[in-house]
Amino acid sequence: MVGLEEFYEILRDPVAYGRKLKSEGHRRIVGYFCSYTPEEIIYAAGAHPFRIFGTGDTIHLADVHFQAYCCSLVRGALEGALAGRLEFLDGAVFPHTCDSIQRLSDVWRMNVKGPFHLDVVLPVKLDTESAKAYMSDVLHKFVRDLESRLNIRIEKGAMQDAIRVFNRIRRHLGRLYEIKSEQPGIISGSDLHAIVKSSMIMDRDRLMEILPGIVTELEREKGEASEPAGKRLVMAGSICNHPDIYRIIEEAGGVVVGDDLCTGSRYFEGITIDQDDPVVAIAERYMARPPCPAKHAGLYERARHLVNIVREKKAQGVVFFFLKFCDPHAFDYPYLKEALDRAGIPSIMVEVEDQLPSEGQMQTRFETFIEML
Ligand code: SF4
Ligand code: SF4
């Protein structure tokens, strides 16, 4: 598939990719955490939004600031920053989401020298009129903060262009997911994961040179590829740093046809609808997007959303995939599982650290689960 290797290369070494962008005199590079960071505004500021997932280093510097029971994403990101491996960043943006990211922001502000630091203190509750007004105010402030840190002015036209770019990216990623669900054998789970995850890191102009070609290629091949015998599964949870998990599931007789993951559909869900104030348009997308566990939009919204995905994708079961010590997802798990049980949808829960447990052990667990579906 054209361009696929480029996505894998970025995931193998995102730091090298960031340095390469920097050395090419690319846009200024702004690191960010989590899809609640308004990437469109960063892009409209003439900068490049670069998602930080940790650097894969052995963690020892971050241990001075974080207990071992913080998730590996925040510990890994801090380790990379303290070790000077993120020196190519011109700034870092921290959205107000889970406790771990909020504390990471504090530790980063006090200990990481050099790049500018910005918080985006979004509302936690997302289903009220006042939250909508508050969300817009916060994003307007983020525009002003970014203008002052980068010493530029963000024009309305640039913002509208950025919204169009990100809407195109989201539509293409969404279409890839639809194609995968329509014909699961057409692209492997690991390949799809690599495309979506590296889309959060890659130069977005380059991304839009490659992505439409991949969608066209798969549309053309649709109907030709043979169907795997796999049982259809939905994956739900936080960050997935393990492309191998998709292969293990496939070898155990399953196939992931949809997800509710931070490294999956949660990244590209929802289109920003053009309106007079582009910042309000961005705020409205966040308000309408299905919430993650660090946000609230009604007591049952997440369960309703998950059951809907399963029904829509005609899936037979759910794989919960959590990073160890990720409290928001762990807290939501019992109620989500109960909702799935009530709807007659079987599920399995897998919790991982930086490394996957032994492959044989995982394979056996998945085989047992998939056999009973
Ligand atoms: S669970 Fe929510 S806060 Fe955490 S990374 Fe995902 S979108 Fe961000
Ligand atoms: S949502 Fe979970 S995985 Fe993501 S940063 Fe917070 S604790 Fe870590």
Image: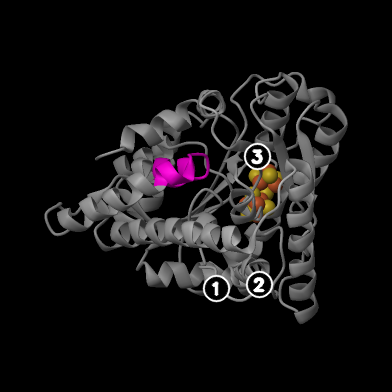
Label 3 neighbour load within 10 Å: few <14, some 14-19, many 20+: many
Alpha carbon distance from label 3 to label 2: 24 Å
Amino acid at circle 2? Asp
Sooner in the amino-acid sequence: mark 3 or mark 1 = 3
Residue 298: x and y in percent read 70, 75
Residue that badge 1 annotates: 274
Residue that badge 2 annotates: 277
Q: Nearer the viewer, residue 298 or 271?
A: 271
Alpha carbon distance from label 3 to label 1: 25 Å
Q: Is residue 237 visible?
A: yes
**Labelled pair 3, 1 in contact (Cβ < 8 Å):** no
Question: Based on the displayed image, in which of its 4 quarters is residue 364 positioned?
Answer: top left
**Labelled pair 3, 2 in contact (Cβ < 8 Å):** no
> Over which residues does the magenta segment extend?
193-207
Quarter the C terminus occupies? bottom left
Residue that badge 3 annotates: 30
Q: What's the magenta bit mostly, secondary-structure-wise?
A: helix
